Amino acid sequence: MKFDTKVVRSGIHPDPTTGSIVPPIYETATYVLPGVGQDKGFDYTRSSNPTRQILENNLAAIENAKYAVSFASGMAAVDACLKLLKAGDHVVCGDDVYGGVTRHFDNVLSAYGIEFTYVDTTDIASVKSALKNNTRLLWIETPTNPLLKITDINAMVAIAQTNEILLGVDSTFATPVFLRPLEFGADIVMHSTTKYLSGHNQIIGGVLATNSDSIYQKMKYIQKTIGAVSSPFDCWLNLSGLKTLHLRMRQHETAAMQVAQFLQSHPKVSMVLYPGLESHPQHKIATEQMTGFSGMITFELNDGTEAGKKLMNSVQLCGLAESLGSVETMITHPASMTHVDVPPQDRRRRGLTDGLVRLSVGIEDVEDIIQDLEQGLSRI
Ligand SMILES: Cc1ncc(COP(=O)(O)O)c(C=O)c1O
């Protein structure tokens, strides 16, 4: 089955009782068992639910994975992944990851004896030198949030395999339309389905996908034991959104390229980061390992923070919002919003300046998006 067909159809069959083409929302906590010691595949919704199972099957198919496990949020998925480790284990993590991830690692998991080292994963030598005897996991985001750094997945797979550690890839920004890390040999891929995979700003969700039987068994065990599961209604909304993923992503990308070129030529903009631009530091790797560059752009204005704030308060079509990856264009100030819990000195060391603006280009008419940015920039 070709990718676009998988997106629309994989794992989704007419409902056996009615023939309904759209899967029902099995909004139930429990299931009446036919007899003691018997079930029809379901007993309690924390363990499994038919609507969630359909979503998991669809997500696994489009990620080209054997298994997918759905969670109540991207962060719950990250947490479940880290629960594969134990006290005394060490993790090498990309230095430019979503602020909530570093908050979880440094302020929650560290207290349970897991140790973290942050490195620029675009620098292969730094990753190698950060490894320790107790390193168990290499965790990368590509493209990263918010600097859109691209990490060479082949190089990370080689490091992980040589050192017999797990490689986890947060592929939220790329989506399976443009990148499927398991095909490179990664052990686990993670998405915040809140973003492109649902695509309509309606739900909070997350997913982990893998080809490993043992990792899957552990993830299922953690999912049912901890219970950070996505609700049947959220799974249903996610399934609806997923059906147009391939179309949305191509539109996000086409529009983002035009917006990135507009910003690059604007006199008030000092720097534009978009993996599709030749000026992007890892443009070559992006071209080699991704089939598209997605819809996220990060830029900086000549007059820094104050100018950024003015722009964000002046735009009308672009919504000032924390999130990304939806049909609506959204603009964010990482230093005060998504990455506010990263200590200022760490933000500066990472190159995450206070003047940085992150733009999630939606699927409105690109001329309207550019016109809105133009009028916003004219007020600075
Ligand atoms: C790259 C990335 N990973 C993980 C997350 C966390 O996902 P969620 O907000 O669904 O918990 C986010 C949220 O913005 C993100 O941008």
Image (spheres, helix red, strand yellow):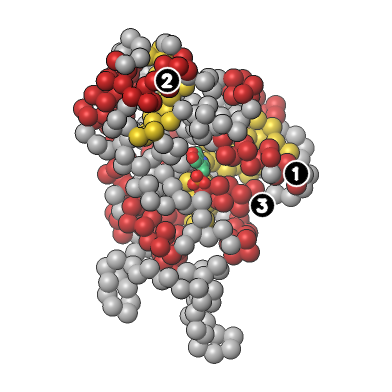
Rendering coords of residue 8 (x, y %): 30, 56
Q: Which residue is mark 3?
A: 83
Rendering coords of residue 47 (x, y %): 55, 68
Rendering coords of residue 241 (x, y %): 33, 52
**Residue 268 or residue 309, whichever sits in front:** 309
Provide the secondary structure element on which disc 2 rests: helix
Instruction: Find out whether the residues at labels 3 and 1 contact each other: C-beta distance under 8 Å.
Output: no
Q: Is residue 16 above or below residue 134?
A: below
Compute the Cα span from label 2 to label 1: 36 Å
Mark 3 or mark 1, whichever is nearer to me:
1
Kind of residue at disc 1: Ala
Beta carbon of the mark 1 residue lies under 8 A of ligand 1: no
Looking at the rendered image, the quarter that the N terminus falls into is bottom left
Looking at the rendered image, the quarter that the C terminus falls into is top left
Q: Which residue is mark 1?
A: 111
Compute the Cα span from label 3 to label 2: 39 Å
Beta carbon of the mark 3 residue lies under 8 A of ligand 1: no
Residue drawn at point x = 27 percent, y = 68 percent: 21
- Residue 70 shows in the view: yes
Q: Earlier in the sequence, mark 3 or mark 1?
A: 3
Left/right of residue 129 with respect to residue 344 in the rendered view: right
Q: Earlier in the sequence, mark 3 or mark 2?
A: 3
Label drawn at residue 308: 2
Q: Given the current orientation, which residue lies at the most extreme bottom position?
A: 35
